């Protein structure tokens, strides 16, 4: 049991969390930030971020994250490599327990736990993950030098990562369940012009086959019902994300997909608990929007704590906000 009560704890170390760390540190709230198992979140797995302002030539995801961490730490943010395993939000100060067995209390909590790649959920996927099935072209693309791979999905992530893979592979087959991509037009145009691309439309993957490694995919055309087998050396899956909100089930309001519900002030259904980035944003999911949301959450958390400290400390009540209940 901790003896001190932190002013603010931040859960998560992606762009939203590190920005919240920077802002709360600059306002002398001495934030304590738990990184989760890896610092940086999803952007850390991105080879090139081309649309974050201030970097006209682009910047790699890992470098951007390192810079954000350094900037937050410069002002006193304590970045701790530990994973939060439990939170108690029905008492105040809130309780945050971590994998290392520590228990902390805090006046305000900022949740930036992000989202994780959605799996296809087909036979062979789990067994062959790391042996030809990947969710990260940046991490694994190198291992497919000179080979042929498939990419599943038609969104920005699928096309962007497929374009990245063309640096290494001889052929990228994009398998999409419709006959139109969801990705931005600019990305589409780059893909359509690239000779290493091939598109397999109206098709889903129903099984991933191989013994020691992926050797082929079983495909089904959703319009004709035709089943076929596609030989491939690897498959990269980009079919959207699932918010990392399991810790907050039954504790915070969330939508039917598990995204935390916040108001315009980034407040969740419990006053003093804020959320920013992809844990509460299924719409924009950009580094720039996550940074903005992390900044807003930090400013609101700071106001919340300042109000608490100006008046008598309110003890253990933490009513659910009427506004978004
Ligand atoms: P997304 O936009 O939700 O796209 C997911 C894709 O997977 C869609 O094409 C979807 O098909 C397909 N899909 C979903 N479930 C499937 C299933 N079970 N089987 C087969 N296909 C399935 O996800 P995302 O590409 O990861 O992007 C998420 C967000 O991040 C978006 O807002 C995106 O704009 C943003 N993002 C931006 C950039 C950038 O700006 N450079 C880069 C990456 C991501 P349908 O099209 O038929 O629904």
Image: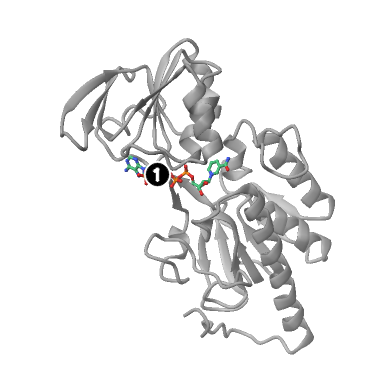
SS at mark 1 in the image: loop
Point out residue 23 in the picture as x, y percentages from the top left corner: 77, 60
Q: Residue at x 72, y 82 (%)?
A: 308
Quarter residue 20 falls in: bottom right
Q: Is mark 1 within 8 Å of ligand 1?
A: yes
The image quadrant where one finds ligand 1 is top left
Q: Residue at x 71, y 34 (%)?
A: 59
Q: Is residue 4 visible?
A: no
- Given the current orientation, which residue lies at the most extreme top position? 146
- Left/right placement of residue 199 relative to residue 86 reads left
- Given the current orientation, which residue lies at the most extreme bottom position? 312
- When the figure is inspected, residue 156 is found, relative to residue 92, above or below; the finding is above
- When the figure is inspected, residue 268 is found, relative to residue 211, above or below; the finding is below
- When the figure is inspected, residue 200 is found, relative to residue 287, above or below; the finding is above
> 10 Å neighbourhood of mark 1: few (<14), some, or many (≥20)?
some
**Which residue is denoted by mark 1 in the rendering?**
118
- Left/right placement of residue 116 relative to residue 223 reads right
Viewer-side residue, 103 vs 159: 159
Q: Is residue 245 visible?
A: yes
Point out residue 125 in the picture as x, y percentages from the top left corner: 31, 32
Q: Residue at x 69, y 65 (%)?
A: 296
Q: Quadrant of the N terminus?
A: bottom right
């Amino acid at each position: 049991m901790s003896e001190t009560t932190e002013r603010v704890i931040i859960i998560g170390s992606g762009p939203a969390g590190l920005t919240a760390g920077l802002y709360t540190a600059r306002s002398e709230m001495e934030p304590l930030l738990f990184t989760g198992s890896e610092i940086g979140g999803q952007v850390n797995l991105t080879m090139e971020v081309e649309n974050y302002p201030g970097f006209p030539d682009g910047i790699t995801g890992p470098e951007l994250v390192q810079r954000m961490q350094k900037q937050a730490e410069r002002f006193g943010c304590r970045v701790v490599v530990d994973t939060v395993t439990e939170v108690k939000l029905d008492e105040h100060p809130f309780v945050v327990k971590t994998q290392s067995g520590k228990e902390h209390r805090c006046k305000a909590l900022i949740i930036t736990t992000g989202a994780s790649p959605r799996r296809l959920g087909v036979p062979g996927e789990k067994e062959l993950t790391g042996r030809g099935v990947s969710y990260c072209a940046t991490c694994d693309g190198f291992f497919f030098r000179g080979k042929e791979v498939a990419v599943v999905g038609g969104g920005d992530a699928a096309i962007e990562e497929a374009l990245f893979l063309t640096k290494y592979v001889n052929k990228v087959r994009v398998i999409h369940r419709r006959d139109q991509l969801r990705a931005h037009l600019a990305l589409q145009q780059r893909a359509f012009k690239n000779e290493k691309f091939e598109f397999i439309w109206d098709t889903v993957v129903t099984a991933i086959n191989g013994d020691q490694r992926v050797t082929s995919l079983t495909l089904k055309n959703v319009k004709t019902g035709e089943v076929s087998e596609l030989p491939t050396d690897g498959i990269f899956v980009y079919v959207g994300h699932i918010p990392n909100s399991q810790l907050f089930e039954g504790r915070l309001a969330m939508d039917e997909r598990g995204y935390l519900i916040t108001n315009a002030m980034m407040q969740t259904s419990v006053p003093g608990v804020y959320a920013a980035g992809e844990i509460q944003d299924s719409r924009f999911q950009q580094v720039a929007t996550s940074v903005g949301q992390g900044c807003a959450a930090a400013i609101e958390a700071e106001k919340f704590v300042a109000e608490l400290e100006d008046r008598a400390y309110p003890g253990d009540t933490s009513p659910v906000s009427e506004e978004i209940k």
